[in-house]
Image (cartoon, grey):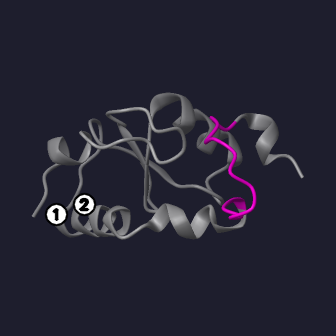
Amino acid sequence: MPNVLETINKECHDCGQHGPHWCSINHGVFLCDECCSIHLSLGRHISQIKSFKQSYWPPTQLNLINELSLHGANLIWEYSLRDPQNRLPRKKPTARDALP
């Protein structure tokens, strides 16, 4: 069973920065501080954020988040962005990305 320190040694699923300290629980992805603030601005009904350092993580929840991460949870959320014909580099999301 992974512990919190093993989890935060991974990378942000939105921008690739090493050592994310946050997680979007309902998306199952790890987030850095900057991407976390973007997710927070989307609202709790879109992304539910939890800190690895400031929050209690039951072992079952931490294990679930790690399993989702290991098995490509981000591929589900970015599916529409992954057009094989369009090989754009990964970019850091901005608040404008959330606007319709």
Q: Does residue 82 belong to the magenta stretch?
A: yes
For numbered disc 2, what is the local secondary structure? helix
Q: Residue at x 31, y 64 (%)?
A: 70
Residue range corresponding to the magenta coloring: 81-93
Q: Residue at x 62, y 61 (%)?
A: 78
Q: Residue at x 29, y 69 (%)?
A: 67
Disc marking residue 59 = 1
Residue 64 lies in quadrant: bottom left
Disc marking residue 62 = 2
Q: Is residue 15 left or right of residue 84?
A: left
Between residue 45 and residue 67, name the one nearer to us: 67
Between residue 76 and residue 40, name the one nearer to us: 76
Residue 85 lies in quadrant: bottom right
Say what amino acid the circle numbered 2 marks.
Leu
Whether pointer 2 and pointer 1 mark residues with C-beta atoms closer than 8 Å, the reply is yes
Q: Is residue 70 left or right of residue 24?
A: left
Say what amino acid the circle numbered 1 marks.
Pro
Disc marking residue 47 = none
